[in-house]
Amino acid sequence: MKKSIKDLGDIQGKRALVRVDVNVPLDENKNVTDDTRIQAIVPTVNELKAKGAKVILMAHLGRPKGEKNPEFTLAPVAKYMSKVFGEEIVFIPSVEEAAEYVAKLEDGQIALLENIRYYKAEEAKDDDMTFAEELAKLGDFYVNDAFGAAHRNHTSTAKLAKLVKPAVSGLLMEKELRCLSQALDNPVRPFTAVVGGAKVSSKIGVLENLIDKVDNLIIGGGMAYTFVKANGGKIGNSICEDDQIEVAKAIEAKAAAKGVKLVMATDVLVTDDFSGNGTNKFCAINEIPDGFEGVDAGMDSRKAFAEVLKSSKTILMNGPVGAFENPAFAEGTKAVLEAIVEATANGAVSVIGGGDSVSAAKKFCKAEDFTHVSTGGGASLEFIEGKVLPGVAALDDK
């Protein structure tokens, strides 16, 4: 367990150097179009404010690649955050000028530093601590609340925590670690994982780690067709990774050896036009005609998935079971999410683990319908794979 801001003593007047993830989407007029990530850090910032700390937020926006590119400025984000917090957020235009701005902060005031990725040293893959030492001068203690960037071994996410002590997690980071760890390491059984997405290759680590932990494993989405082909099925023009066929066979064998129930689609919705404007029809997953590709779970598969999910006590979802971005191919993913919502209402612990699953959950349900909707994409994926996240490892242990 890592220490959190709850474990800090008196921080009145102290400078809190806080790494947050406010990498939010902006429209062409630089207006924030989805403030989920900003809302997620509000509890941590408010807690630090309430205890009288001077709050200096560090964050990135997009990928400026170590250059001061105005397209990636955090200024519009600071402006939006001022509305969220009901007070002006002090915008610090550069690290070079930061000390001057920080010196003028009053207790409980919030500042946001310009895009930390404007500096090449932020993402440098070396042991040079010069940039970390420069940032360290700005704070009396360090807080990491950026779970979405915790898998990055960057200056602001990992190196800084070695220099500024105490180094603790924020409330969002603490919740992410608690919910994901509870699901993976101490689940109430039966424990079911839904793993979807297009490619087996991107989810090998996830599948292999989960087989050691789950009772049921639902495999859906484009990756399912590699498993079907591995078993000699006809998959038409469906996405398939021929170089992963042996991996698929090994995963099936491991599941059988561990007594894990693998739940695969038996029928699918297929199309001859991925835009959704062609011929769409249902067929058996191992009898897809040439010229057609599988794009969603079929009716029988949706029922089978829902049945398993509704009888589960812990559920982890990582990836959709169809090309849900197109409404014509969204019903399978929608059915899975609705079954998870029902299970949650009946007492199950449900964690939506990052990336496309989160987009789908937001599209078809409400975040509060689940126990936890992760704010991490790559970070959630790596955590579920069982990897050590540098941004977490660098924090103080309890």
Image (spheres, rainbow, N blue to C red):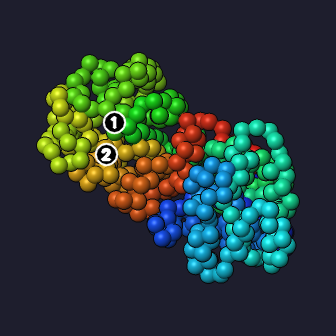
Q: Residue at x 70, y 61 (%)?
A: 58
For mark 1, give the secondary structure. loop
Residue 250, above or below 303: above
Q: Are marks 1 and 2 in contact (CB under 8 Å)?
A: yes
Q: Residue at x 16, y 35 (%)?
A: 283
Residue 328, above or below 101: above
> Pointer 1: residues within 10 angstroms few (<14), some, or many (20+)?
many
The one of 396 and 344 positioned closer to us in this rendering? 396
Q: Give me the disc on residue 222.
A: 1
Q: Residue 380: name its quadrant.
A: top right
For mark 2, give the secondary structure. loop
| Residue to which mark 2 is pinned | 323
Q: Residue at x 69, y 72 (%)?
A: 91
Identified by mark 2, the residue type is Ala
Image coordinates of residue 161 in percent, x first then y, are 78, 50
Lower sequence index among marks 1 and 2: 1
How far is the residue under mark 1 from the one under mark 2? 8 Å
Q: Residue 378: name its quadrant.
A: top right
Using the rendered image of the protein, determine whether residue 243 is visible from the camera's viewpoint: yes
> Pointer 2: residues within 10 angstroms few (<14), some, or many (20+)?
many
Image coordinates of residue 210 in percent, x first then y, are 50, 34
Using the rendered image of the protein, determine whether residue 117 is visible from the camera's viewpoint: no
Identified by mark 1, the residue type is Gly
